[in-house]
Image (cartoon, rainbow, N blue to C red):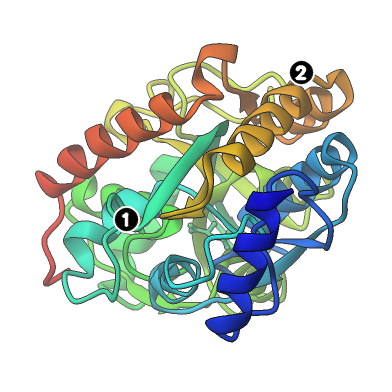
């Protein structure tokens, strides 16, 4: 009680209206900020998790999309948010790639956040507009090669999953194509379905529905083995692209300084939500694999982020 009062006074003095009161947390809606456009795969992960965690916390979780600059705009917003547990960041592999690609970003992904835990691993699929003539990855390579840079591919900005996958594909085949950047692959998918761009590599949390409905063609997954929910799509090694293996990990973060009692509530709610068979099944239908119990912990996300920052530092350069 004493602590709540002190926190309230500090918040009033600093002009903030959201009070970090661990005892009563959450007493107002929590925001999951997604640093990409609405309707995309990261947004889908956030909305499914928000619903499941909100039930465990006994409060409402709202998803807000703040897109731009490959996810660094929205991530920077959370880095500067009041550390009271009411503004959290849900981001993916882009948290690690941004260190190399955005050296001038307004925040340090390691120093500015308290990791809550890892969520789900999602593979990717190379997809093309339904009217694109290639029917296999080998044919897509010939098509892109013949285009001599004119074939277009969509991505969500430098450092995003779609950008990494597209870049890896073009580098492995020593080809060029015209990049068409979007604020997220939700809007990019609309243009792919509409035939405005030729191809894109994106998480199965976005592509599965469109592949199944025939709105896009799928050429390859970025997994070593076929994905059970997309059995007709060749794995990376089957398509002759073992180097295209890529799994997109997602994490939940709170701003640095969030009180430990609030973090513990969030950690427990995350772990419990990921135990929910309905949530696991929904992620599974979309090709995602919920992380093992030991990874739903801050230490696991901290270690993953550190390892991935080093991994991508060796592969990417700020000039890309
Ligand atoms: N799939 C996007 C990416 O390429 C982000 C998004 O829109 O969720 O990282």
- Say which element carries label 2: helix
Please, is residue 26 above or below residue 189 in the view? Answer: above
Instruction: Determine the residue positioned at 70% across, 72% down.
Output: 190
Which residue is under mark 2? 275
Image height check: is 266 above or below 73? above
In this orientation, which residue lies closer to the viewer: 17 or 298? 17
Q: Residue at x 31, y 28 (%)?
A: 303
Q: Position of residue 289 (x, y in %)?
A: 62, 24
Quarter occupied by the C terminus = bottom left
* Res. 293 in view: yes
- In percent of width and height, residue 75 lies at 45, 66
Of 99 and 77, the residue lying toward us: 77
Q: Earlier in the sequence, mark 1 or mark 2?
A: 1
Which label belongs to residue 109? Answer: 1
Do the residues under discs 1 and 2 have CB atoms within 8 angstroms? no
When the figure is inspected, residue 37 is found, relative to residue 300, above or below; the finding is below
Callout 1: few (<14), some (14-19), or many (20+) C-alpha neighbours within 10 Å?
many
Furthest residue toward front: 2
Residue 167: quadrant of the picture:
bottom left
């Amino acid at each position: 009680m004493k602590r709540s009062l002190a926190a309230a006074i500090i918040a009033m003095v600093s002009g903030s209206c959201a009070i970090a009161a661990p005892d009563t947390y959450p007493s107002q809606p929590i925001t999951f900020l997604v640093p990409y456009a609405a309707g995309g795969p990261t947004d889908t992960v956030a909305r499914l998790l928000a619903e499941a965690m909100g039930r465990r916390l006994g409060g409402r979780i709202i998803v807000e999309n703040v897109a731009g600059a490959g996810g660094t705009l929205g991530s920077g917003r959370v880095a500067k948010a009041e550390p009271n547990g009411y503004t959290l960041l849900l981001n993916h592999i882009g948290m690690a790639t941004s260190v190399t690609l955005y050296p001038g970003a307004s925040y340090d992904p390691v120093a500015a956040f308290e990791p809550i835990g890892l969520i789900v691993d999602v593979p990717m699929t190379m997809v093309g507009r339904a009217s694109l003539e290639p029917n296999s990855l080998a044919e897509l390579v010939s098509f892109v090669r013949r285009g001599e840079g004119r074939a277009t591919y969509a991505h969500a900005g430098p450092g995003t999953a779609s950008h990494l996958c597209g870049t890896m594909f073009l580098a492995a085949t020593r080809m060029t194509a015209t990049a068409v950047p979007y604020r997220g692959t939700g809007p990019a998918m609309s243009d792919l379905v509409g035939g405005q761009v030729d191809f894109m590599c994106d998480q199965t949390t976005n592509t599965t529905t469109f592949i199944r409905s025939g709105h896009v063609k799928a050429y390859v997954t970025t997994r070593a083995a076929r994905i059970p929910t997309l059995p007709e799509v060749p794995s990376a090694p089957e398509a002759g692209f073992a180097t295209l293996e890529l799994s997109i990990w997602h994490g939940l973060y709170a701003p640095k300084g969030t009180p430990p009692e609030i973090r513990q509530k969030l950690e427990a709610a995350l772990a419990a939500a990921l135990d929910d068979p309905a949530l696991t099944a929904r992620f599974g239908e979309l090709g995602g694999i919920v992380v093992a119990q030991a990874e739903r912990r801050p230490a696991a996300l901290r270690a993953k982020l550190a390892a991935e920052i080093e991994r991508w530092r060796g592969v990417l350069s700020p000039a890309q």
